[in-house]
Image (cartoon, grey):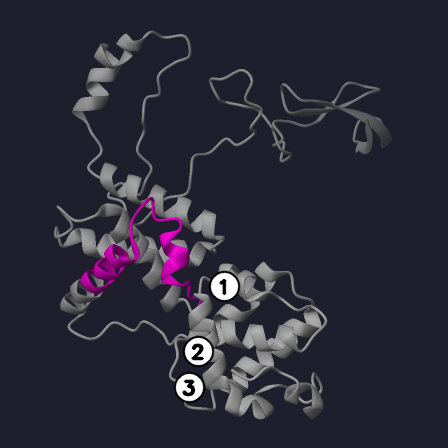
Amino acid sequence: MADAFCTDCKKNTEVVFDHSAGDTVCSECGLVLESHSIDETSEWRTFANESGDNDPVRVGGPSNPLLTDGGLSTVIAKPNGVSGDFLSSSLGRWQNRGSNPDRGLILAFKTIATMSDRLGLVATIKDRANEIYKKVEDQKSTRGRNQDALLAACLYIACRQEDKPRTVKEICSVANGATKKEIGRAKEYIVKQLEAEKGQSVEMGTIHAGDFMRRFCSNLGMTNQVVKAAQEAVQKSEEFDIRRSPVSIAAAVIYIITQLSDEKKLLRDISIATGVAEGTIRNSYKDLYPHISKIIPSWYAKEEDLRNLCSP
């Protein structure tokens, strides 16, 4: 109960709220002080068919502008306890007649979402990959091509465009069996299609070794101080003409930094965490070694420590 001023009693009295009618009633004289008031609190009611489902959500999913109907079409689900003849019933036949023209897109978007979740990518990258695939699909040129490779390539391009690049090997690990070569071919094909549509080159973004550093260090369980030193070192390495891939440089810098710390890592462990072959890391280390005194931060290692590093 709460207190409110009653015009009949001429004083503040306790009032009772009638939830069924939406009325506020004086508890002393019975006067209705307010009628049909709106209850703005949450209902927390469940409208699902399953009795065991306690999900309080009362709305459907968000609209998707990439789909013809915005993704708001209705699908008649098979009720619990119904035999397999449901699709041959009247409801099932009507649903099949009005088949969703975006069924292929919906399946593709679900696959991209699954791959994004497995890689821990943010929603903006997933949405960008969906947009890229929709543009390619609208050109009706994907028939006969490896669908998994196309979707993986869309995700790879989206990561590049959002400045959150992933290596092809990382994308390949969630590509449902598509190989690196197939993903590479699919990427070239998609870029060619997008350039033909826009009439200009597609901006892919520049990959830097620092883009991979924090993730690789996290995979190796390195401390914050060591990670900070590795990030500074990889930034300074860009000042020199080291003709290696950014991923290889990142792996080599991690190897150097860990050898200068108490958290020494085996070359095999770094290879597994970064996806770079041990031989490639050694060759990159060989290219970095002449510049090592200028690359490694002075606060992290002394000249004597650098001289104690094994020569390549």
Could you say where residue 234 lies in the image, as x and y percent from the top left? Answer: 53, 80
Task: Please tell me whether residue 160 is drawn above or below residue 172 in the rendered image.
Answer: below
Question: Which quadrant of the view contains residue 163?
Answer: bottom left
Q: Amino acid at mark 1?
A: Ser
Locate residue 293 relative to residue 160 in the image: left or right: right
- N-terminal of the two: label 1 or label 3? 3
Q: Amino acid at mark 2?
A: Asn
Where disc 2 sits, the SS reads: helix
Task: Please tell me whether residue 199 is drawn above or below residue 221 in the rendered image.
Answer: below
From the image, tell me which residue sits under label 3. Answer: 242
- Residue 247 appears in the figure: no
Q: Residues within 10 Å of mark 1 (few under 14, many from 20)?
A: some
Task: Please tell me whether residue 30 is drawn above or below residue 288 in the rendered image.
Answer: above
Q: Which mark is residue 271?
A: 1
* Residue occupying the point 66% across, 22% down: 19
Q: Residues within 10 Å of mark 3 (few under 14, many from 20)?
A: some
Which segment is the magenta one? 164-189
Q: Which mark is residue 283?
A: 2
Locate residue 297 relative to residue 118 in the image: left or right: right
- Residue 206 appears in the figure: yes
| Residue situated in front as seen by the camera: 246 or 103 | 246
* Residue occupying the point 52% across, 60% down: 273
Where disc 1 sits, the SS reads: helix
Could you say where residue 58 lies in the image, as x and y percent from the top left? Answer: 50, 31
Q: How many angstroms separate mark 2 from mark 1 (CA)?
A: 13 Å
* Residue occupying the point 68% across, 89% down: 298
